[in-house]
Image: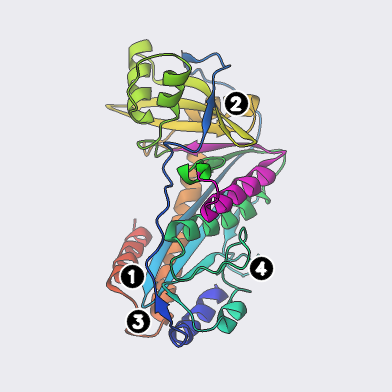
Amino acid sequence: MREIFELASSLSRLMSIVGELASPEPIDLSEIGGFEVGCDTDFTVGELKPVSIDYPLMGLDSHSRIIRFLGVDVHLVTGALVGGDNVLIPQPNGTNNVRWIGLKLRFKPRDYELLDKLSEMFYIKSSFLDNEYFVGSYNDEAVRDEVRNHVEVTLMRAVNNNAFLLVDGPVFPTPRVLSMEGNKYASVFNGIIESRVKALNGLKAVGVVKRIEHSHFLARYLRECGREGVPMVDDYTLAIKRATLALPNSRSVYLGPIVVKVGNWVKYCWYVVTRTGRNASVVRVEGLSEEVAKEGRDYVGMLMTLSGTAVPIHIADKLARRLNASAVLMLYNLSPGGIITYEGLEEVERARGDLVE
């Protein structure tokens, strides 16, 4: 983690170029808009049956934290690819040269010479906008998502072509800002989508989305394609209700498919409801092709853990989370005293907790 040493020694120098402070610009990253649903599918609800797994399975996950220092937010994004040849970001020997640390300055610097030097090692300006540094009013969530995408795309490129990959999260995001023509963050997320689709092209891979309490793909489909008077409630509530009414005694139930379109990009989505004791978990399984999405649906239904995710992703999550916690504590111990904020200290304590789980 040589980047941590370099960053710790650079924090004081960054304080020397402080200019005008600025508040972050707001952007809408919700899934309420920004996409269309296709109605030319045969939507079904059925029971998932055990199937044979015909490929080596791989899991991919990343973990991000923001450590806030005076004037500087440090985005630490670590990642893990497990199954077959395991890959970690950062690698212990520091050989993969991935910019897994993003720097966001909460001010406009007086000059950019130091930032240009640091950009060789750190993610400090957008790859999808011309000469746009992460400074001043640049949105914090856009920084986080771009750095995280960079880490995950790097891991995707390391996947064995003969494997079946399960990725934590969507195959590509569909935030509402995509529908806002002329918004610079729409360009950022279009760039993120394009890079992910390109990296996943030719792979058997699905995204597994756990947090669907604020997603509305299913409600949108039922309203527009099923001509049902469905309220715009979240996907988790709708999926549980539909699965329970259709197959109340089944352990694992699927609903779908739903075709989601964003510009020229298309993904195929299935919902998998799995009952474990008194609880039920719901995930959305997404693929870039109908065949791969359906295959991934069957695999995920067999591999769900009590924590509500598939086993390969669960393993990758543990590795990425602990690697991230180690990086946080290392940065805290090496950074100059008195410049970490109270929020930063809270994140350090959470990192300590992840290491003793």
Label 3 vs label 4: CA separation?
30 Å
**Numbered disc in front, either 3 or 4:** 3
Quarter of the image for residue 293 reads top right
Answer above or below: position of 16 versus 39: below
- The residue that mark 4 highlights is 95
Tell me which segment is drawn in magenta.
180-209
The kind of secondary structure element at disc 3 is: loop
Answer above or below: position of 235 versus 319: above
Q: In the rendered structure, find residue 295 and report the number of the disc placed on it.
A: 2
- The residue that mark 1 highlights is 344
Label 1 vs label 4: CA separation?
28 Å
Q: In the rendered structure, find residue 339 and report the number of the disc placed on it.
A: 3
Answer above or below: position of 272 versus 190: above
Answer above or below: position of 203 versus 72: above
Q: Amino acid at mark 3?
A: Ile
* x 35%, y 81%: residue: 339
Q: Where is residue 146 drawn, in percent x and y?
A: 54, 57
Q: Where is residue 223 drawn, in percent x and y?
A: 41, 20
Quarter of the image for residue 207 reads top right
Left or right placement of residue 315 versus residue 292 in this view: left
